[in-house]
Image (tube, grey):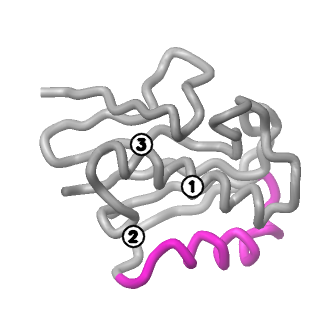
Amino acid sequence: MKQVIQTTEAPLPIGPYSQATMVGNMLFISGQIALNPQTGEMVQADIEEETHRVMQNIGAILQRAGMSYENIVKTTIFVKNLENFSRINQVYGSYFSSHFPARETVEVSRLPKDAQVEISCIAVR
C-alpha cells in the first residue's frame, strides 16, 4: 500500500509529484532543493547554506513520516558544480552521527530553479 507523505515544514512540490511516498517500511523522498518552505523562494546564498536548507527540508519530511536522518539508507546528490563537492559533503555529513547512507553524487548541467544542489533519498523504518 502506498501513502503520500506531505508537510508544510518542507516546500510544496513545484510539479506533479509528492514530497515523499511511503511503501511498507520504505520512504522515498523526492529531490529537495533549497526552497524556503514558508516563502516558496530559493535560498540565495553560498553552497553551504543552500545544502543546509536542502537537508532541513529532508528532515521535515522524515519527521512527518516518524523518522530521522538515521533512517536514511540511500541518497543521491545532484550538483551543478562538482568543485563544490567537499563543501557540500561537509554540511551533508553533519546531519549523520554514524552509519552513513550509501550514495552517489552526480554533476549535472542544470537543476530546477537554478539550484546548486538537489538531494533525494530513501529511508527505512
Q: Residue at x 59, y 61 (%)?
A: 105
Residue 44 drawn in magenta: no
Q: Amino acid at mark 3?
A: Ile
Residues shaded magenta: 80-98
Q: Residue at x 35, y 61 (%)?
A: 68
Q: CA distance from mark 1 to mark 2?
A: 17 Å
Corner quadrant of residue 91: bottom right
Q: Residue at x 59, y 70 (%)?
A: 92
Q: Which one is in front in this view, the residue at disc 1 or the one at disc 2? A: 1
Q: Which residue is mark 2?
A: 101
Q: Earlier in the sequence, mark 3 or mark 1?
A: 3
Q: How dense is the environment of label 2, judged by Cα within 10 Å: few (below 14), some, or many (20 and up)?
A: some
Residue 90 drawn in magenta: yes
Is 49 positioned to the left or the right of 119 in the image? Answer: right
Q: Is residue 26 above or below residue 23?
A: below
Is 19 positioned to the left or the right of 5 in the image? Answer: right
What's the mark number on residue 29?
A: 3
Q: Are marks 3 and 2 in contact (CB under 8 Å)?
A: no
